[in-house]
Image (cartoon, rainbow, N blue to C red):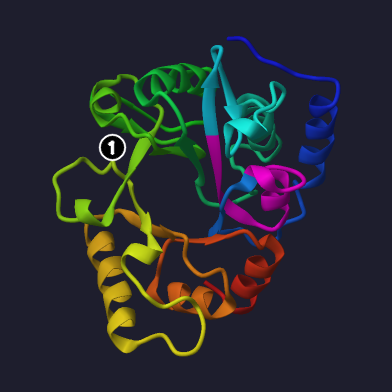
Amino acid sequence: MLRLFTTYIFPTVLFAVASVSHAADQPLQRAHAHNDYLHDRPLLDALHNGFCSVEADIFLIHGQLLVAHTRLEISPDRTLQNLYLDPLQKQIRNNRGRVHKNGPVFSLLIDIKNTGEKTWRELNKVLAGYADIISRVEDGQFYPGPVNVVVSGDRAWNAIEVTSPRFAGVDGRVSDIGGDRALHLMPLISDNWRLHFQWRGENEFPSKQRDKLHRLVRQTHEEGRRIRFWASPDTRAAWKELNAAGADLINTDDLPGLSEFLRSNSE
């Protein structure tokens, strides 16, 4: 497997991974770093703040999985391997089998931005090179690892479902609740907050909308799946409502803020 390490990225990653091994004394299962790669230290800032879930957008460009939000931001040294898979692998080895010492399974959400099926095939091939750390499904059997990968964005459902071994699940939508997809194929429900709620994180959360949030969380949990909302208000008031409802992942761009909130409002 081809790996790109530049003189700029690689030493930084090695140093920083070592520096976060004891930084987070309490892993935060609900903390999800939205567009994590936009932070000064992708993945590493999230780990330092105790996050147990991060999100990376990828483009398939000339056979490489490059992490960026748009094509204008693509850089050849920002590969999925450099920014996420290699430091996660090192972190897990340092912590004897976990991303956070004695912590839960870590979630890596990968949002496919282009050529869904083609990108998926390359992604699964790359993830197979990290089979020692990533959960997989083979012949219908789920084999857990310290990292669960979930594919979002341009989701090539048909191609993903028949892949074996498969090193990722897929995130569903609220409309998929009550369906018959296997848990290992669709472990997570993700949806746009603004499609379901009018509240924007200010003033009081209307009771009917609060009831709907609690109902969606409950229905998802009854199926054994987890739930998150993107584009949710990134405010303490919204974090409080999501936390109280039992939402499994709370999106944020404010890593220290959500970390402090969850630590002071213990999960």
Indicate the amino acid at tag 1: Leu
Q: How many labels does the image show?
A: 1
Q: Residue at x 32, y 88 (%)?
A: 207
**Magenta residues, start to end:** 37-57
User: Based on the displayed image, in which of its 4 quarters is residue 3 positioned?
Assistant: top right
The residue labelled by disc 1 is 185
Camera-nearest residue between 81 and 135: 81
Q: As rendered, which of 71 and 151 lies closer to the eye?
A: 71
Q: Residue 189, relative to residue 11: is it above or below?
A: below
Q: Examine the structure image and report whether residue 76 is included in the region drawn in magenta.
A: no
Q: Does the magenta stretch include residue 53?
A: yes
> Where residue 148 sits: x, y (%)?
45, 39
Residue 240 point in image, percent of width and height: 51, 78
Quadrant including the N terminus:
top right
Q: Which residue is drawn at 80% across and 28% down?
A: 9
Q: Is 141 on the left or on the right of 229, as rendered?
A: left
Callout 1: 10 Å neighbours few (<14), some, many (20+)?
many
Q: Residue 216 location, x and y as percent?
A: 27, 67
